[in-house]
Amino acid sequence: MKRAFKYRFYPTPEQAEQLSRTFGCVRLVYNKALEERTRAFRTDGRKVSYLQSSAALTAWKRTEELGFLNEVSCVPLQQALRHLQAAFANFFAKRARYPVFKSRKRSRASAEYTRSAFRWSGGTLTLAKMDTPLDIVWSRPLPNRAKPSTVTVSKDAAGRWFVSILVEHEIVPLPSVEAAVGVDVGIAELATLSTGEKIDNPRCERADRRKLAKAQRALARKGKGSNNRAKARTAVARIHARIGDRRRDHLHKVTTRLVRENQVIAVEDLSVRNLVRNRSLARAVSDAGWRELRTMLSYKSAWYGRELLIVDRWCPSSKRCSECGAVAESMPLRLRQWSCVCGASHDRDVNAARNILAAGLVER
């Protein structure tokens, strides 16, 4: 299967300037092609194909106004048109909304290079229009005899540079085990397992909330368009990046452990989009990263030969007794311990995790 390996790198001033120019040209080509396709559909009622957009790009390069597009590699520009074509395909298939323009301030700065636009030799990566290889920090090795097919270079809001290398990689499934576990996500504890174990929630955003608030107040005092405002915006972005990195690292460790130790994992199908509309819970739910937790469990289970069971969100997992199956009339959030009419005493979260596992096995 194809798998991407992401690394941080440190460009030279010349490389940073070339990449920044490439990001701008990619954004310009995407927006201009989107504008042309939208105008053609609204005025003439016709659809513009990728080949027509590619021919238009060639014409733009020949003009005096857009002649600077020839200063960067042509491959990332063509890839921008392919991404636009995929966006329209998703729109017409009703999988996504109508494509929107890329913003210089809010959109992700990235450029994609295919095999003809980079040179991979002896573990060094050199992009088109560059004389020296990228100074990549190899935090983990690539698979043996890996041959990159696509390279994506990006820069985040905190000013960090990353390169994502796509290679063909054979993942060996883990040995089968007999264990099965139900997972109930929460806020006080990130996850409660049907075995009775509770996994702590690091609350990464809460830990840096004071520092983030101070940086945001400093940003609000800076004049719009000034260099000081740009520096303050970068300071805020760095704090957000640190929070995101810590959260993602914790989620990777938790999900990898669950996948390694259990053959079957049952989780609840929660609608995080609706939950964050609650003003009282939105910050805590977002900080926990429930959606990312499920996403990681999904692809890691597929990689390593595990089974992920999704339980219907309307299943009364908290109100149902895991011993006799009786369902309580109400179960407010403040009630963490409760007793059933059958005499069983329950921890709310452990009981819910056991019911999630049972419901998943039944639906399976």
Image: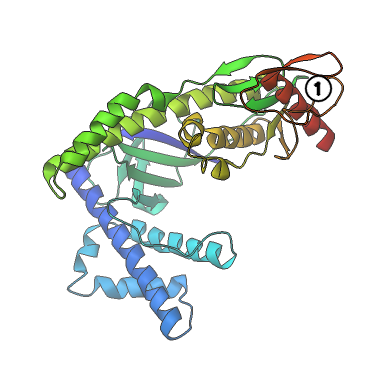
x then y, percent, for residue 228? 13, 40
x then y, percent, for residue 210? 30, 25
In the image, 312 versus 93, the foreground residue is 312
x then y, percent, for residue 95? 58, 59
Q: Quadrant of the N terminus?
A: top right
In the image, 317 versus 9, the foreground residue is 317
x then y, percent, for residue 99? 44, 63
Which residue does the image show at 34% across and 65% down from the upper left?
31
Residue 21 in view (yes/no):
yes
Residue 272 lies in quadrant:
top right
| Relative side of 169 to 227, left or right | right
Which residue does the image show at 56% across and 68% down from the upper left?
92
Q: Quadrant of the C terminus?
A: top right
| Relative side of 294 to 310, left or right | left
- Looking at the rendered structure, the kind of residue marked 1 is Ser
In the image, 202 versus 309, the foreground residue is 202
Residue at the disc numbered 1: 322
Relative to 81, say whether 229 is above or below.
Answer: above
